[in-house]
Image: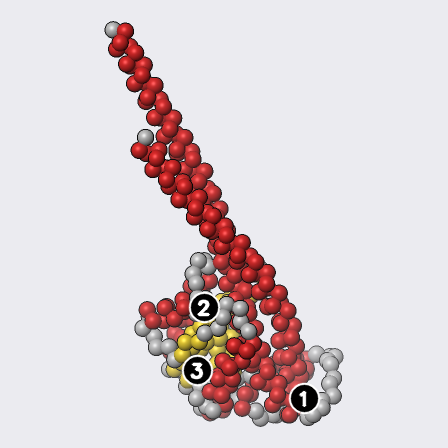
Amino acid sequence: MAKARAIVKRRKAVRNIRKITKTMQMIATAKFQKSLKRAVGTKPYTLKVRELVGELAATVGDVEHPLLRWPEESGGAKRLALLVITSNRGLAGAYNGNVLRTAAQFIARQGEQKVAIELYVVGKKGISYFNFQKRPITQRLEVSDTPRIAEVRPVADQFIEAFTSGKVDGVYVAYMNFHSAGMQRPDVMQLLPLAAIGNKAAAGTATRREHAVYEFSPDPKSLLDELLPLTVRGALFQAFLDATTSEHVARMVAMKSATDNADKMVKSLTMKYNRARQSQITTELAEIMGGVEAMKG
């Protein structure tokens, strides 16, 4: 009877765990739907701003701007800033592991080229990881689970100031890039410099037969002074939105998998309990029949 009781207790514990994972799955699904609308809704704006900046850079030609300089112009990159976006909570499958692995590979590649890395980390999981690795963190940043532009803008302005003042030669962001509900990939995005935008736009304008022609007012250089910082802020905000949406997807999938595994375990434990109970009943019947036979004798 002791074995059957142990199975019953374990089955009850698994059922309680299933209730928790099912609830977390439903919460993650609701958060994902809300986050998806924000990420998908802002992406066309972000892409259009980058396209407009590319058109401006191609129109102006050789334009000099602090945000468009290449590190090679000052003797090559010697110090880079890397922002790593992770989550504050676990139970999200391989989400944090993939982002941190990608960031570690980027740091290793830069280390081989003798490039120093200033590390900026968002999320408790990333902070714990780099503390365990004994890697110094330049700054721990805090952004809410629902990123707002008012929170991201000071971070972007901080990186812009560090880049334009020459403290760093480039700014990169390691995050989970959201492509669709079924595909998210860890990526390292170059946030600064923005010189690649102008180069790509110029190359694209030269190869395309037809392209949009804009009349600018005020002049393109004045517009670049306004649009380039806006592009940086928009790209960083989009990275935060993609990371948050990917986190909710990962947690939703992980909790669904945990719920399904709990269902399977409950069924398995029920079968074991039935067998144990059947065995006990058979033993009890045999003992009764043995007693009856003994009394007859």
Give the residue drawn at x 30%, y 11%. Answer: 292
Q: Which residue is mark 1?
A: 59
Q: Which residue is mark 3?
A: 80
Marks 1/2 in contact by CB < 8 Å: the verdict is no
Asked which quadrant contains residue 89, the reply is: bottom left
Q: How has the structure been colored for display?
A: secondary structure
- For the residues labelled 1 and 3, the Cα–Cα distance comes to 30 Å
- For the residues labelled 2 and 3, the Cα–Cα distance comes to 19 Å
Q: Which residue is mark 2?
A: 86
Marks 1/3 in contact by CB < 8 Å: the verdict is no
Residue type indicated by callout 1: Thr
Give the residue drawn at x 46%, y 51%. Answer: 20
Horizontal side, residue 60 vs residue 31: left or right: right
Asked which quadrant contains residue 238, the reply is: bottom right
- For the residues labelled 1 and 2, the Cα–Cα distance comes to 39 Å
N-terminal-most mark, 1 or 3: 1
Q: Residues within 10 Å of mark 1 (few under 14, many from 20)?
A: some
Please say if 293 is above or below 207.
Answer: above
Q: How many marks?
A: 3
